[in-house]
Image (cartoon, rainbow, N blue to C red):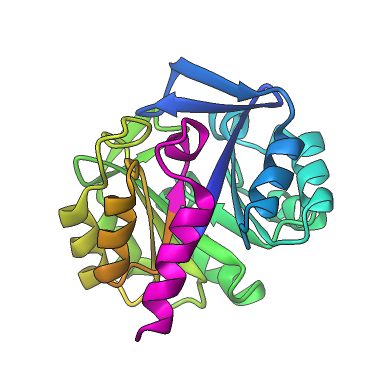
Amino acid sequence: MLIYPAIDLLGGRCVRLKQGDYAQETVFSDDPTAVARRWVELGADRIHLVDLDGAKAGQPVNGEVIRAIAAAVPVPCQLGGGIRTDADLATVFDWGIRWAVLGTKALQDPNWVQVVAARYPDRIVLGLDARNGFVATDGWLATSSTKATDLAQQVETAPLAAVVYTDIAKDGMMSGPNYEALREMRAATRLPVIASGGVSAMEHVRQLTETGTFGCIIGRALYEGQITLPEALTLVRAKQSSR
């Protein structure tokens, strides 16, 4: 299983939200580039970035910081938040981003996701943020009537890199992942599933590894010390080598 340390950007700073609520913000650093370097020093081989301002605005916002992070670390970066047009994709890839996460636009226009996935094979990630199983959009400010599993099935024939599945009720709450929802997503699609939301203990990492989850995004637990990155990487790599 792959480990993705998360860096959420709001106003150019590294923050974490609780359940996607912009009013429940914790600032962890005024220097997100230094945070990215730190995760790499501790062994990270990839970074997950979220442009929270972009998710709200409907277009990428934190370009200066994102470019700086991509240039500062020797590992690939994944970015979500506000990427909704061909121009947005070209822009973020020009910033040095390896994988672009498409969420709101995927719900609005699944066909477009398939088209851009064909144009950029294995560089587009489907971002499914779910509230009670239904896709949430616009920085989690709205909830649709579309089931996350249905949307994954709708676009899975395209050459997508993966699907990031986030359970909003779990995000930032340090209460553990929604294993049942993740199981349903893995069963519903052939796409590799990256778990996001609620991972706050080594036991959660172990369980995700044992259930065959492709990747795991960890945020608040790393910043608050409930999980150390070297410990998590050692666990998943040991599991991999034992197979």
Q: How far from the left and from the top, in percent, is residue 177?
A: 26, 47
Whether residue 149 sits left or right of residue 79 in the image: it is left
Q: Nearer the viewer, residue 188 or 198?
A: 198
Q: Residue furthest bottom?
A: 243
Verify whether residue 231 appears in magenta.
Answer: yes
In the rendered image, residue 44 lying in the magenta stretch gets the answer: no
- The percent position of residue 87, horizontal first and vertical second, equals 74, 51
Residue 40 appears in the picture as rendered? yes
Query: Which x, y percent locates residue 242?
Result: 36, 83
Q: Foreground residue, 89 or 225?
A: 225
Image point (75%, 58%), residue name: 93
Q: Which image quadrant is residue 86 in?
A: bottom right
Give the residue at x 25% y 43%.
176
Which segment did they paint magenta?
Answer: 217-243
- Magenta stretch, main secondary structure class: helix
Side of 181 relative to 98 (left or right)? left
Name the residue located 33 percent from the left edge and 77 percent from the top edge.
190
Which quadrant of the rendered structure holds the C terminus? bottom left
